[in-house]
Image: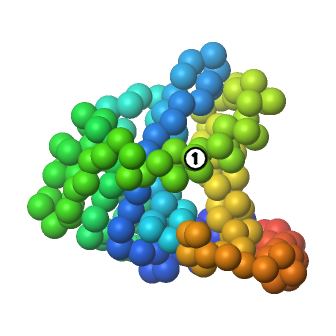
Amino acid sequence: MLTEALRKRRKGQIGRSWDVDETYLKVAGQWQSLYRAIDTNGNLVDVFLSATRDQAAAEAFFRSAVAVTGIIPETITSDKHAGYPPALDAVFGADVERRTSKYKNNHLGQDHRGVKGRTRPMRGFKSAVSAARFCRAHDEVRNALRPVAWRKQHVLAARRWAIHVQRVAALHDMLAVA
């Protein structure tokens, strides 16, 4: 499957400072939480859809992120969601520095626009399985097509186009194999 191949390519390639945030999506008429994390360079860490927004969901998300990346972060920046501190203690212990700020992970909050903009015309999802599959695939493909290596890095339009064409060809080859 394409998303699994893209996830394997990211293993060990993620930075050690993560920004974590969640947003809401409508699934089968109910609001569900979409947990997302990116590293300081804007690379996707992981995506996790949960019916609840609590400590158990946050723990499951962090366990999934570590399993996908193979990396234990040094710093995690999040909003002041009450479920994060106990979940971080349960998953990482005292090994991870926690930063809670309403503003330090604003770029991740803005990054939700990609998935929200794509799902809004769809008017939500009919099942949690299809929603989770779509959200993971959307973010994986979007991350694979990202033309810059670091946030706020300027890349000339011609170079962005060349990178885009190259990465689309690679995704096409992955789809052909899958």
Query: Of the residues shown, which amino acid type is indicated by label 1?
Result: Gln
Residue carrying label 1 = 110
Residue 148 on image: x %, y %? 66, 75
Q: Is residue 22 left or right of residue 7?
A: left
Colour scheme of the picture: rainbow
Kindly give the residue lying farthest to the left in the view shown: 94
Could you tell me how many numbered marks the image carries? 1
Which residue lies at the image location 52% right of the left edge and 45% below the top edge?
109
Mark yes or no: residue 5 visible. Answer: no
- The residue nearer to you, when weighing 162 against 142, is 162
The quarter of the rendered structure image containing the N terminus is bottom right
Which quarter shows the C terminus? bottom right
Q: Say what secondary structure mark 1 lies in.
A: helix
Residue 24 image offset from top left, x and y in percent: 54, 31
Residue 126 makes an appearance in the image: yes
Residue lying at 54% horizontally and 66% vertically, measured from the top left: 42
Please tell me which residue is depicted at 22% across the width and 56% down the height of the picture: 98
At a point 56% along the width and 75% down the height, the residue shown is 150
**Residue 85: image location, x then y, percent:** 20, 45
Quadrant of res 173? bottom right
124 displayed left or right of 176: left
- Seen in the picture, residue 129 relative to 75 is either above or below; the reply is above
Give percent across and percent down for residue 49: 51, 40
As rendered, which of 85 and 56 lies closer to the eye?
Answer: 85
Farthest residue to the top: give it: 29
170 left or right of 41?
A: right
The picture quadrant where one finds residue 29 is top right
- Sort mark 1 into few (<14), some (14-19) or many (20+) by Cα contacts within 10 Å: few
